[in-house]
């Protein structure tokens, strides 16, 4: 059986604070239509796709909750689900989730071609800080606004329409942590969908990182980890200048050998597509990265025993 599916990365340009929900959704519908016209049956949208990247601002109360979705789908986003179902296209999309218990998560969902939700994910590796940084023009307050994801890194088995692919999700900073990939790899993942809103500067302060370096890091971690887990990866940006704050682009589709097969060329709304042969994963999974044959988990205990670094003791002079 040929296991090829055509997928699209739907990079989005900037979304300003003043942009209406309707305006942003209309852009997403156009991207969906373009991807479907190119034959894609899966479309990957960015992190926090329906809004601006609001964690750069200090916001409280109802002003914060307006950026969150209390259910998914809901009337504001239902047109995306309806259009996708009519086109026979599924999608990944990131959004801010507000639960009935009042907890917020940086979340994403994977929606099948019939409009049903195949899987849900909540971002585990939250960057930034709880308290605002003094004298900073832009903040990174995900730790203030969101709880840490509590769903782990689940893999999901798609149906025949997506060639029975084993799929997983990450959000932005998750892609920088090899643990995210390896947990999915240990479930046989064949396609990882990733949305991101990554600053074009060091969001934690300082001047040692610029847009070029941060774009390089973004593609580096996607390529390296796709190779080391023998999986396809689709990493999709919200890019450009949001209210003066830059976001990198560099959306890409990477094969199981770590090679970029398609990459965005702009910082605007842009669709890129590729045909994903899922059987290309077999070479890595059965040989170099045959985990059952080569992994030695008894030697990796320190990874789960602690979070931070413990250095060897300094040797005394004799």
Image: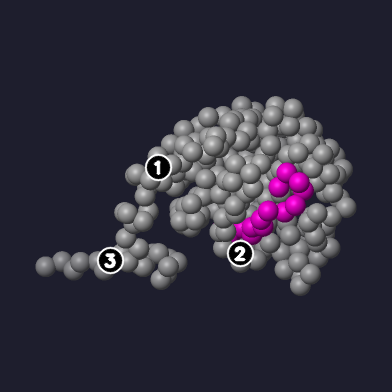
| Residue under pointer 3 | 312
**Could one spot residue 315 in this view of the protein?**
yes
**Disc 3 to disc 1, C-alpha distance:** 35 Å
Front position among marks 2 and 3: 2
Q: Is residue 105 left or right of residue 154?
A: right
Point out the image quarter for the N terminus: top right
Residue 294 in the image: state x and y as whole percent: 31, 54
* Mark in the foreground, 2 or 1: 1
Range drawn in magenta: 112-129
Residue at screen point 55% across, 53% down: 174
Q: Are marks 3 and 1 in contact (CB under 8 Å)?
A: no
Residue beneath disc 2: 151
Q: Quadrant of residue 66?
A: bottom right
Q: Position of residue 87 (x, y in %)?
A: 78, 36
Q: CA distance from mark 2 to mark 1?
A: 27 Å
Residue 15 shown in magenta: no
Q: Indicate left or right for 95 with 283 as reference.
A: right
Q: Earlier in the sequence, mark 2 or mark 3?
A: 2
Which SS class for mark 1?
Answer: helix
Q: Nearer the viewer, mark 3 or mark 1?
A: 1
Colouring chosen for the image of the structure: one colour
Quadrant the C terminus occupies: bottom left
Label 2: how many Cα within 10 Å (few below 14, some 14–19, many 20+): few
Q: Is residue 132 left or right of residue 175?
A: right
The span from disc 2 to disc 3 (Cα, nearest Å) is 34 Å
Percent x, y of residue 6:
63, 33
- Taking depth in this image into account, of 211 and 300 the one nearest to the observer is 300
């Amino acid at each position: 059986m040929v296991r090829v599916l055509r997928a699209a990365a739907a990079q989005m340009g900037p979304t300003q604070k003043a942009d209406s929900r309707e305006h942003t959704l209309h852009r997403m519908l156009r991207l969906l239509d373009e991807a479907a016209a190119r034959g894609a049956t899966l479309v990957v949208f960015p992190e926090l796709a329906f809004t601006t990247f609001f964690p750069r601002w200090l916001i409280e109360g109802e002003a914060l909750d307006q950026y969150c979705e209390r259910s998914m789908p809901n009337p504001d986003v239902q047109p995306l689900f309806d259009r996708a179902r009519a086109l026979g296209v599924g999608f990944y999309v990131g959004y801010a989730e507000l639960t009935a218990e009042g907890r917020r998560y940086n979340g994403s969902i994977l929606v099948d071609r019939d409009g049903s939700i195949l899987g849900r994910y909540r971002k585990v590796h939250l960057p930034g800080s709880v308290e605002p940084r003094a004298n900073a023009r832009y903040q990174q307050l995900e730790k203030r606004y969101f709880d840490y994801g509590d769903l782990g890194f689940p893999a999901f088995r798609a149906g025949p329409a997506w060639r029975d692919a084993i799929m997983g999700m990450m959000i932005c900073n998750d892609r920088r942590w090899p643990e995210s990939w390896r947990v999915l790899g240990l479930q046989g993942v064949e396609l990882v969908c990733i949305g991101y809103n990554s600053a074009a500067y060091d969001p934690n302060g300082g001047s040692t990182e610029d847009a070029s370096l941060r774009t390089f890091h973004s593609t580096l971690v996607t390529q390296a980890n796709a190779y080391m887990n023998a999986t396809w990866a689709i990493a999709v940006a919200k890019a450009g200048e949001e209210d003066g704050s830059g976001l990198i682009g560099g959306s890409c589709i990477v094969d199981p050998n770590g090679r970029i097969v398609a990459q965005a060329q702009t910082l605007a709304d842009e669709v890129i597509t590729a045909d994903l042969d899922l059987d290309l994963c077999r070479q890595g999974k059965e040989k170099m990265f045959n985990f059952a044959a080569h992994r030695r988990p008894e030697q990796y205990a320190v990874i789960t025993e602690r979070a931070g670094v413990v250095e060897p003791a300094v040797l005394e002079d004799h």
